[in-house]
Image: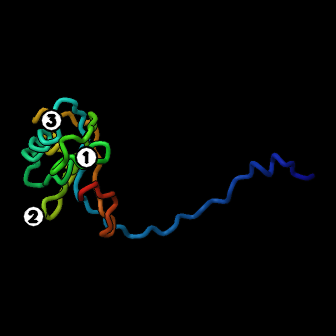
Amino acid sequence: MEASADEDRFKLAPLVKDRPKAEVVRELDGVDVFLFNNELVSDEIGEKLEAVAGPEFSLAVITNRGVKVYPGGFPETFTTDHWRCRFQINPEQKSITNEDILKLLSRVQQAGLDFIKIENLYRFNGELGYSLGQGQ
């Protein structure tokens, strides 16, 4: 008896064996903290964030709609209520952890800023796993 076209269509694919996994070294470089803010201007946000960066991080850049607004932004830049604030590991630090990021977020909140999302910044085998922002 011949198999129908429907039976051929629904045959299970052969099992695929696991491939060997390459060794990957992952290093945490920093974190992008996204804020909701429609009251403060970029310099005011930047000053608050510089004060709470702590010993582990430095505030590298703030962007709004993909445009660098701090440090050295232009006051006439049209901004919205969504800010990306990039904190990178201080050069004096050997490494940072998620615990360091949690402490940073606590300080951001204590400063009265509303963080709405974060994205960790990693290197994989020494290569950046994230894009540089304008002005970096």
What amino acid is at disc 1? Thr
The location of residue 38, given as percent across then percent down, is: 22, 30
What amino acid is at disc 2? Glu
Residue 92: numbered disc: 2
Q: Gap between marks 1 and 3, in whole Å?
A: 19 Å
From this viewpoint, which residue is outermost toward the right?
Answer: 1
Q: Are marks 3 and 2 in contact (CB under 8 Å)?
A: no
The location of residue 85, given as percent across then percent down, is: 22, 46
- Image point (10%, 41%), residue name: 48
Residue 63: numbered disc: 1
Residue 35, image quadrant: top left
In this figure, which colouring scheme has been used for the structure? rainbow
Image quadrant holding the C terminus, namely bottom left
Q: Is residue 127 above or below residue 79?
A: below
Residue 109: numbered disc: 3
Label located before the other in sequence (3 or 2): 2
- Image point (74%, 48%), residue name: 10
What amino acid is at disc 3? Gln
Q: Gap between marks 3 and 2, in whole Å?
A: 25 Å
122 horizontally vs 62: left or right: right
